[in-house]
Amino acid sequence: MRPGGSVAVEVHDALEARDDGGPEEDEGEGESSRFVDVMRDRRVVRLGVLSALIDVFDEPFLAFVVAYLTAAQGHSEEVAATAAGLGLVGSVVATAWASRSGRRTPPALVGGLLVGGVLAVLVAPHPVLAAAGSGAVGAAVNLGWITIESRALTLRPGQAGATSAAVSVVAQAAIVVPLLAGAVADRAGLTT
């Protein structure tokens, strides 16, 4: 799933998998058989799991920032929304940097931005620091997503569409995280 992605994008990827520009299929080997082969590739599954992990820190994290800053830190909704919104600014800045640098993003940079940003949001005594943390998380999400997607598109030559669709299918597992977070929050008595 792409940041800001939708069901329409997922359907598009699945349809693209039908015409991936790859070699002509052997007689008796259908489209579904080729897609199953892609889904069985451990490298594809790993990319899907990484994408699911990154997805958790996209929109669900922005919602968490707003809820945390208002409910736990006592800030106004406007301050919390502004702090969370800087996550989007971090995403845009990271994307611009990645497109201009032409270099691969080191995984340590993505991990460092992600961990540092989450910690800044959680322990920041001031909303400006939480906003900087949100921006770092936004940057990490986009840099991670760019890395995962570029790898998916080149992982199986001639099957870029099927590979991207398979990664997206595996990444759909991330959809349960907001549901679980909501259940935990309700059980813990978090109120707004």
Image (cartoon, grey):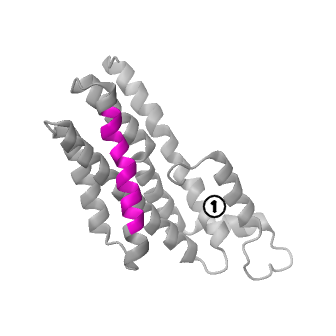
As drawn, which residue projects farthest toward the right?
A: 27
Give the percent coordinates (x, y) of residue 9: 65, 53
Q: Is residue 14 left or right of residue 43?
A: right
Which residue sits at x=43%, y=59%?
50
Q: Nearer the viewer, residue 172 or 131?
A: 131
Q: Nearer the viewer, residue 189 or 45?
A: 189
Q: In this picture, which residue range is highlighted in magenta?
A: 80-96
Which residue sits at x=29%, y=32%?
79
Q: Height in image: 82 above or below 22?
A: above
Q: How many marks?
A: 1
- On the question of residue 87 being in view, the answer is yes
- Residue 169: quadrant of the picture: bottom right
The residue type indicated by label 1 comes to: Ala
Secondary structure of the residue carrying numbered label 1: helix
Q: Is residue 64 left or right of residue 47?
A: left
Which residue sits at x=39%, y=56%?
91
- Residue 84: quadrant of the picture: top left
Residue 50 forms part of the magenta stretch: no
Residue 95 forms part of the magenta stretch: yes
Q: Height in image: 111 above or below 175?
A: below
Q: Where is the C terminus found, in terms of image quarters?
A: top left
On the image, numbered disc 1 is attached to which residue? 165
Give the percent coordinates (x, y) of residue 72: 23, 25
Q: Is residue 48 left or right of residue 85?
A: right
Q: Nearer the viewer, residue 75 or 21?
A: 75
Give the percent coordinates (x, y) of residue 53: 41, 52
Mark 1 Cα-neighbour bin, 10 Å: few <14, some 14–19, many ≥20:
many
- Residue 26: quadrant of the picture: bottom right
- On the question of residue 143 being in view, the answer is no
Taken as a whole, is the magenta stretch helix, strand or loop?
Answer: helix
